[in-house]
Amino acid sequence: MGGLRSTIVLLVVLAGLGGYIYFVDANRDPMALDAKPRAFVDLSADQIEELQFRSDSGEASHVRRVGDDWQLVEPSTADADTGVIGTVTSNLASLEVQRVVDEQPTDLSQYGLDPARIDVAFRLEGEEDFAHLLVGEQTPTGGDVFARRPDETRVFLISSFLDSIFNKTAFDLRDKAVLKFDRDTADGVELVGDSIRLRFAKEGTAWRIAQPISARADYAAVEGLITSLSSTNMQRIVVQDASDLREYGLDRPAMTATVSGGDSSATLLIGTQDEETGGRFAQDAGRPEVFAVDESLLADLSKGVSEYRRKDIFDARTFTATRVETRRGDETLTLERASTDSDAAWRDASGQEVDDTVVDGLMMKLSALRADGFEETPGTAAATPALTVTVGFGSDQTESVTFVRSAIDVFAARSDEPGAARINPTLFDEALMAVDALQ
C-alpha cells in the first residue's frame, strides 16, 4: 500500500514538473537558447551611412551611401559594389560575441590587436563619430578571431568566416563590372576586331544580325554575349588614369565592343596582354582607368557570325501555322486553316478537310530541322530542289525554305537569308515522308 502511495505521489510530482516545463517553454523565445550577445546592440544595417576600412595590408578605403547606392570615395572615386557593402553592413548589425576571453587585457598584442590587424569603422545616419570594430588574429584552433571595440576594454571572439568579410581593400569594395550600361534597354551590339565586324539589332523581342549579313540571330547567343559584357569583372586596376593608351594596346584595340540602348551607348576596348594576370588590358571608354580582364572574354567576343545565327530552320510551329505549301517536283500541295485555334480544321485547295494529325505531324518534323552549320556558298544553287516549303504563321508572317540534296549533304536555304544551312539528312527524309503522307 505504501509503495502504491509513493508511486502516486511521484506521478503527481512528475505531472507538475512537466506542466511547469511546458508552460515555461511555451512562453520562451525559441531563439533564446542559442542567442549570443551582439557586439553592437540595436544596430541596424540600413542605419549605416559610411564605412572606413583598414585591411591587413594596411590599405585604407572609404565608402559612402549615396541614395540607394554606395560610392567609393577613397583612395579613388568609383561606384561601389552594393552586394559587397550589403554583406559588410548586415554582418556588422548581426555580429555576435561568441565568447569574452579577457575582460581587462594587459597585453593586446597577444591577440593581434595592438595594433589591430583589421579596422572597420562605420558612421550612422544623423551621427558624426565613427564606431569601430578591431579585428585581430585567429585563435590557435582557427575557429574564431579575436576582436574588440575601442570604447570597451574586453576582448571577445567572433566567427572566423567574418575575417574575409571585414578584410576589404578598395578593389574589393568597388564595382568591378568592365562595362556599365542598362542591361534591360540594350537594343544594339557591335563587335569590331582584327578579323571580325558584327552588328546585332533588336526588333521587338527578337534579335537580328545586321552585319556582315542580314539574318535571324539566335536569341540566347546574343543575350549571352550581352550578359558576358555586363557581368564580367575586372581582374585588377592597372592605372587609375592612363595618359597614354598605346602602352596598353588600347589606341588600336584588338577588340571593341559597343552596347547601345535608346540614346546612350557604352564601349569596351580590349588591348594587349597583361603579363601580371595573363589576361588583357581593357578600358570602358567612358571611364579613365585601365584594368585587366580575363583572356576568355576576348575569345567570347571573337566568335564568328555562324555562332550567332538562329539554328531553327523554321520559326513557325504547329500551334502558330495557318498555311502550308509544299512543292516537290511538279507537285504542289496547299493547305490552309482559318486560325490557330485548335478546333480550326485544315483544308486543301479544293476546300476539303485534311486530317489535322497528319498536318501537325509535318509541322513537327519541319520544326525539328536545325542547322548543323552554315555555308555561304554551298555549291548547290544550280541543283534541282528536293523540296520547297512555304509556311504562313502568326498574323501576317511567311517563310519559305528550299531544300537541296548534294551528295551526302542536305542544305536548307531560306529566301530571306544568305547562304544555306547544312541539316541532318535523316531528319530531312522524315520530313519528306510526312509530306508524302499528305498526298
Image (cartoon, rainbow, N blue to C red):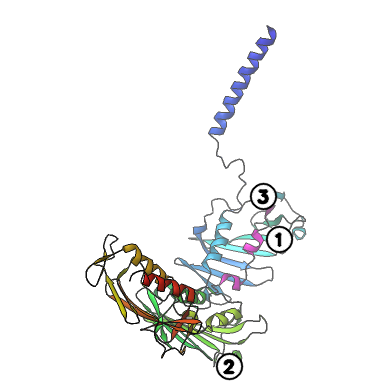
Is 433 positioned to the left or the right of 114 in the image?
left
- Which of the 4 quarters of the picture holds residue 166? bottom right
- Which label's residue is closer to the chain start, 1 or 2? 1
| Front position among marks 3 and 2 | 2
Kind of residue indicated by mark 3: Gln
Is residue 167 rendered magenta in the image? yes
Is there a contact, CB below 8 Å, between mark 3 and mark 2? no
| Front position among marks 1 and 3 | 3
Q: CA distance from mark 1 to mark 2?
A: 44 Å
Kind of residue indicated by mark 2: Arg
Residue 252 % position (x, y):
54, 93
Q: Which residue is mark 2?
A: 246
Q: Which residue is mark 3?
A: 98
Local SS, label 1: strand
Q: CA distance from mark 1 to mark 3?
A: 15 Å
Question: Label 2: few (<14), some or many (≥20) within 10 Å?
Answer: few
Magenta stretch in the rendered image: 154-176
Residue 184 % position (x, y):
41, 72
| Tally of numbered discs | 3
Local SS, label 3: loop
**In the picture shown, does residue 407 fall above or below 136?**
below
Q: Which residue is mark 1?
A: 136
